[in-house]
Image: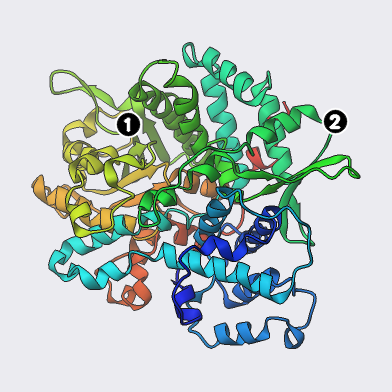
Amino acid sequence: MMGYLVKYSDFYETLVPDNPIELILDIAKEELIATIVAVNTRLKPLTSNHYDDSKETQINCLRTIFLDNENSLEQSFCLPIIRKYDIRPANHKLFSRVTCLYALQEIINCEQFTDTIQEYNFDKRERIFKFLLIANNQILTGDKNYKEEGYDKLGNDFFEFFMFRELHHNQYNECSNAINIFYKSFYLFNKIENHHIFGEHFKNYITWHYNVESTNEFLKHIIWSYIKSYDEKLVLRYINVPKDNTDAIKILDAFSSKVVYDIPAKDDLRTFDFFPLKKSPLFKCKQKDSKNIISYLMMDESLYIEKIYSIFINDFWFDYLKPNEIYTRKDWGSFIGSEFYEPFIEEILNESLSTSPNIVVRSTNQLIFNIEGSPIEYADVYVREKQNVALFEVKSGFIPLDYGYKTVATVEDYKSLDLDKFNKDYGLTQLAEKTIKKFHLYKKEINDPNFNSDRKVQIYPVIIVNDPIISSGIVPFVLKRKFNDLLEKEGINKKAKEHNISDLCIINISHLQDMEQSLKDKKVNFFSLLDLYLLMSDFKNKNNFKGYKFLRTFEHVLYAKVKDGLISDRIKDLKWIKE
């Protein structure tokens, strides 16, 4: 979601109260959470993989807060507020996903709310609205630094600084394709469960933490609960479970357990990790004696989905492996990369290109050669069609909260970062110094008999990432520039007699999933998609200057060319979870 968040101090032209939570203490916590969940749900339409930042949706969210959706616009309770907002520029937003997450975290962490059920008048509903706008003030608290710190002195480094400076809220701009992530979780769980070391520990963890014996049953409960959670009439995600469904309740209780956590100070960017919501993305509602069901509000759809994928990878390490001193974080990370992530990418590519015999795919062990005195894996993946060669570096890691990457507020914070480590951890260094630089050294060793290695080749450097942060927002643009710097440092000419080297392509593993069926059905061509991405994001093309089009990511390519079939046929029937 792009645009400018409207702050309380701007909208009401007054200072933020010293203790904003006091505005809403006389409103029941469950009502507050339900209201904000209703806003958050509307920002992510059911049938879309993108957040809806239109003014129409913003006004819909506003009217939802005031319980006003049944009235005509002319008779709206909050018409003066709507009019006050409507005269603002189109890119001004009252609410974002981060607005909701920030407010939810504040509310979840407070135990002073009234328990009294009451009537809600205009004043109380407006105070909820004010509280959300105050959240925007806190989200944008660092913006004043842009005027105060003289960032113009950074020169070309400004874009890199800006990338890190905005990570704390830009990381939440990407949506999750639920079914694709659930399948990814299924694949991950199978890999862990069948591993000779981690398998037994994994079963113990599932039994201990979620009170279930079968990982397959665990996944079934999570997936079916999600599928049934959307209320089309209320535009709300919640889960109703019969009181006698004890297996489901045990799991959902774990997903809604109270987390003891001291939220960092408001000027501390670690606040935006939203740790309590990641640990417990559900809120358990109070039981009503007259009803035979237990209800849970889904505070954030994406956090619920990621709870059994990206968040689970961290949970299993921090909650079980680390405290029980079972191997190291490096061992766990190595397993995720080599035993899950790389084979999963191979599976997708092999499925995607299975109907294109003219495209050759080689990976991992097929790209290990003993040329320089010892076996070296020169690339993670090699894809060729004619003289077009894509060379992949694949990276399974997520940007951690430590190392300071997500907490850059000032130039000093930026200058203290270990950027060499960042470039290595996320594939740029290896891709430049080994995979691309030494291609003409190892190209004849690749088992690809139809490849004319003596002819000039078009090389596409590609990094496949797991973390959506790295493939979204301004990050790909910054990393493309950095990659060109690394090539220049290595003395590699992008245009030479033997090759042309394109700009770096950064693709998320979810993008591979999204385009699998279209590639398999030959509706699109893999290299044509790469070419389109390079064209759409070409900084040297003046046509891309307007509206900062050079910041377009691979997601924009999929939106233009792969609108349908984002879930492959082999996955969408859910047979894999029924087995």
Does residue 387 appear in the picture of this structure?
A: no
The three-letter amino acid code for the residue at tag 2 is: Asp
Return the x and y of residue 503 as percentages of the image width and height: 26, 55
Return the x and y of residue 153 as percentages of the image width and height: 13, 68
Near mark 2 (Cα within 10 A), the count class, few <14, some 14-19 or many ≥20, is few
Q: Nearer the viewer, residue 436 or 510?
A: 510
Q: Which residue is mark 2?
A: 244
Q: Nearer the viewer, residue 305 or 451?
A: 305
Return the x and y of residue 456 as percentages of the image width and height: 21, 48
Q: Nearer the viewer, residue 560 or 58?
A: 58
As drawn, the label of residue 449 is 1
Cα distance in 3D space between marks 2 and 1: 62 Å
Q: Secondary structure at mark 2?
A: loop
Q: Is residue 162 left or right of residue 531?
A: left
> Disc 2 vs disc 1: Cβ atoms closer than 8 Å?
no
Q: Secondary structure at mark 1?
A: loop
The answer to whether residue 513 is above or below residue 529 is: above
Q: Residue at x 43, y 63 (%)?
A: 138
Does residue 300 appear in the picture of this structure?
A: yes
As drawn, the label of residue 132 is none
Return the x and y of residue 44 as percentages of the image width and height: 61, 60
The answer to whether residue 187 is above or below residue 170 is: above
The three-letter amino acid code for the residue at tag 1 is: Pro
Q: Residue at x 46, y 79 (%)?
A: 14
Query: Counting residues from the N terminus, which is met first, the one under dot 2 or under dot 1?
Result: 2
To which quarter of the image does residue 536 belong?
Answer: bottom left
Near mark 1 (Cα within 10 A), the count class, few <14, some 14-19 or many ≥20, is few
Front: mark 2 or 1: 2
Look at the image and tell me in which quarter the C terminus lies: top right
